[in-house]
Structure formats: C-alpha cells, structure tokens
C-alpha cells in the first residue's frame, strides 16, 4: 500500500449535459445516496460528504453528464 493513497475522485454533474431525467440510473446505483436531487426538474448534484468515489455512477448516465476529472499526479 502506498504511503500516501490518492484521495477519492469525486465526480460532478455537468448541468449543461444533464437532462434532469425522471428516472436517473446514476442516482439509483449510488449506494451512499450521494447523488442528490430536491426538485425533480433540476439536475442532481454530488454530495461530496457522502460520495466515496466508487465511480459506479459515471457510465450509467446515458448523456455523459456525470464526469470525473483525471487523477492528479503527485509531483
Ligand atoms: S445525470 Fe444523466 S441520467 Fe441522471 S438525470 Fe442527469 S442526464 Fe439523466
Ligand atoms: S462515485 Fe460512487 S459514491 Fe460517489 S456519487 Fe457516484 S456512485 Fe455515489
């Protein structure tokens, strides 16, 4: 195990791509309920306090709205 493991990669919802679907498969797969939505007509967002970076949600959005930045390479 490395001395300094990389922090979890927290995805984000690209609101310009999200269609605020009635049924969001990305939300359904999240085991920690980190993809949150209050208004069903609004895009969900990722609650960084709940997300543990499993990235299971990323491929499940059919519109590519859930995105994750490349890992930062330690100097
Ligand atoms: S994240 Fe993807 S699947 Fe979920 S509401 Fe937005 S567009 Fe639809
Ligand atoms: S990365 Fe995992 S824990 Fe975080 S929002 Fe996606 S499915 Fe949930």
Image: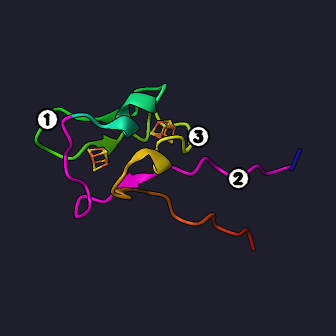
Could you say where residue 30 lies in the image, as x and y percent from the top left? 45, 31
Tell me if 73 is positioned left or right of 8 in this view. Answer: right
Q: Which mark is residue 54?
A: 3
Badge 1 marks a residue whose secondary structure is loop
The residues bearing labels 1 and 2 have C-alpha atoms spaced at a distance of: 34 Å
First in sequence: mark 3 or mark 1? 1
Could you say where residue 32 lies in the image, as x and y percent from the top left? 47, 26
The quarter of the rendered structure image containing the N terminus is top right
Could you say where residue 11 lies in the image, as x and y percent from the top left? 46, 52
- Pointer 1 with pointer 2, Cβ within 8 A: no
Q: Ligand 2 within 8 A of label 3's CB? A: yes
Residue at 86% over, 49% down? 3
The residues bearing labels 3 and 1 have C-alpha atoms spaced at a distance of: 24 Å
Q: Give the class, few, some or many, for how many residues have Cα within 10 Å of label 2's Cα (few <14, many ≥20).
A: few
Which-is-in-front pick, marks 1 and 2?
Answer: 1
Q: Residue 40 carries which label?
A: 1
Badge 3 marks a residue whose secondary structure is loop
Examine the rendered structure and indicate whether residue 43 appears above or below residue 64.
above
Tell me if 38 is positioned left or right of 14 in this view. Answer: left
Which-is-in-front pick, marks 3 and 2?
Answer: 3
Q: Is the magenta stretch mostly helix, strand or loop?
A: loop
- Looking at this view, name the residue that lies furthest to the right: 1
Residue at 55% over, 37% down? 52
Q: Write down the residue under mark 2.
A: 6
Badge 2 marks a residue whose secondary structure is loop
Q: Which colour scheme is used?
A: rainbow
Q: Residue 3 carries which label?
A: none
Tell me if 6 is positioned left or right of 45 in this view. Answer: right
The residues bearing labels 3 and 2 have C-alpha atoms spaced at a distance of: 13 Å
The residue range painted magenta reads 3-22
């Amino acid at each position: 195990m490395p001395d300094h493991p990389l922090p979890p990669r927290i995805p984000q919802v690209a609101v310009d791509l999200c269609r605020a679907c009635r049924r969001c498969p990305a939300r359904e797969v999240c085991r920690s309920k980190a993809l949150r939505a209050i208004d069903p007509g609004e895009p969900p967002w990722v609650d960084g306090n709940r997300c543990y970076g499993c990235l299971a949600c990323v491929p499940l959005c059919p519109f590519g709205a859930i995105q994750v930045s490349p890992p930062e390479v330690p100097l």
